[in-house]
Image (cartoon, rainbow, N blue to C red):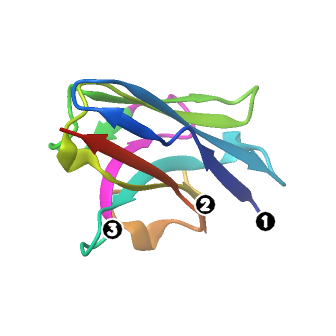
Amino acid sequence: QVQLGESGGRLVQAGGSLRLSCAASGRTLRNYAMGWFRQAPGKEREFVATIRRSVGSTYYADSVKGRFTISRDNAENTVYLQMNSLIPADTAVYYCAARNSDYGSPDEKRYDYWGQGTQVTVSS
């Protein structure tokens, strides 16, 4: 069992930056591909980014490509999402998820464990 806890969400102005963290307990994250997803009010949860378990290659949704960076520190058992050039459309609850596989996925149904989420609000 893996417990995931997100942090770092807050209110920020458009054009600003935030770094979200996802800390794990229970098991080491080095065994899991990791993903970030988000859910805006009244919308379905959507894929943001994923990082492989092994070589750390990444994949992003088109809406965040070039602005967001996913990374992992297996020694700290933590995954990060660096978010730059934030826009109001980025406002959402952000969730991290772990998948017991080398490869992540943009399909949320393929993930085994989820955090509770952290709120990011971008004001215009």
Task: Check disc 1 and give the amino acid type.
Answer: Gln
Q: Is residue 4 left or right of residue 18?
A: right
Give above or below for 16 relative to 52: above
- Please give the name of the residue rendered at 59% of the width and 68% of the height, measured from the top-left corner: 112
Q: Is residue 86 left or right of residue 25?
A: left
Image coordinates for residue 44, horizontal then vertical, percent: 27, 73
Task: Check disc 3 and give the amino acid type.
Answer: Arg
Give above or below for 40 relative to 33: below
Segment tinted magenta in the rendering: 45-57
Label 1 neighbour load within 10 Å: few <14, some 14-19, many 20+ = few
Image coordinates for residue 24, horizontal then vertical, percent: 73, 47
SS at badge 1: loop
Label 3 neighbour load within 10 Å: few <14, some 14-19, many 20+ = some
Q: Marks 3/2: CA distance?
A: 13 Å
SS at badge 3: loop
**Residue marked by disc 3:** 45
Label 3 close to label 1 by CB (< 8 Å): no
- 66 inside magenta stretch: no
Residue 72 sits in quarter: top right
- Please give the name of the residue rendered at 24% of the width and 27% of the height, measured from the top-left corner: 67
**Residue marked by disc 2:** 115
